[in-house]
Amino acid sequence: MAADLLGNDVTAVGVPVTGHIGVAPFGTAGPTPSAGASRSLVLAVAYKVPGLFTEDGGFEWTTEADGDAIVFYQEGYSQPSGLAKAELKLKLAQTDEIVRSIIRGKTADSNGYMTIDAAGTDVKYSLFTEEIFKNGVIRRRWAPNAGVLSVKEDRSERGSVLGYEVTFKIDRSPSVENNHFGEWLIPAAAAASAAPVVTAVAGDPDPAGTGELVTITGTGFSTATAVTVGGTAVTDFDIDSGTQITAVLPAGAAGAANVIVTNPVGGSAAFSYTRDV
């Protein structure tokens, strides 16, 4: 459904259905603008994923100006102070060492023991969040300079989830042009109407071998869900466009290998590519 004459478009309403957060040590790079726009993005291993949220504990972002605006002598002229309140609040549902290390800023010893300072921690993090909406749109945000502002633990009740309401303070960073965070809004993938067709495969270098890149050309790639080479699933691939996929070759023997791209309709006919070791 497109927008009506008044600009109303119910398909553009963001209704969250799931999401996650990755927390990495301060200084960990986030995705590049182009990598973050890929629907098949895989986060760097440095990002810890603290698992489940409580049902009502999804992302709550606050971005508001802080401090009075600077007013000039001439009436009607002012500018923001430049100060801001940027925070992210969510409620984590798991009680484990990943969650504990994030909210306390330290790691337990071999006995599972740590000391806790109620005044908080000054440990800084790099945060990455992803929300998937009912309409298929994906919203991602990367905040490279964040710290835990507060932790509020739920009352322990028999038969209820013990949640940890965590508020992160987001500070400015040169990594996002001295702003607070970067944001991607990725449109819903178009519905597939036919199985993919592979017309060419080229390596870099060519022939490519294990761990090297190949560019797959064809059609029907926008909603690709899997790529296999010689029967082995490719775990790292990017959908560059509806007609091109960039993939890292999995391990395999040298010689002819069938390349197959799959989308929700089905798999492509096998395309033979002669690969290196």
Image: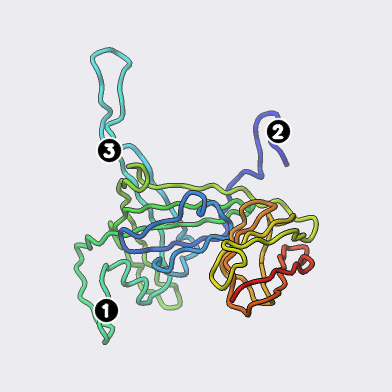
Classify mark 3: residues with Cα within 10 Å, few (<14), some (14-19) or many (20+). Answer: few
Q: Secondary structure at mark 1?
A: loop
Which numbered disc, 3 or 2, marks the residue that appears first in the sequence? 2
How far, Cα to Cα, is label 3 from label 1?
36 Å
How far, Cα to Cα, is label 1 from label 2?
56 Å
Taking the spot 35% from the left edge, 45% from the top edge, the residue there is 180
Drawn side of residue 117 relative to residue 276, left or right: left
- Residue 165: x and y in percent read 36, 62
Which numbered disc, 1 or 2, marks the residue that appears first in the sequence? 2
**Foreground tag (1 vs 2):** 1
Q: Secondary structure at mark 2?
A: loop
Query: In this rendering, is residue 251 above or below 178?
Result: below
Residue bearing mark 3: 83
- Mark sitting on residue 108: 1
Amino acid type, mark 3: Leu
Q: Nearer the viewer, residue 151 or 157?
A: 151
Classify mark 2: residues with Cα within 10 Å, few (<14), some (14-19) or many (20+). Answer: few
Residue bearing mark 2: 4
Q: Quadrant of residue 47?
A: bottom left
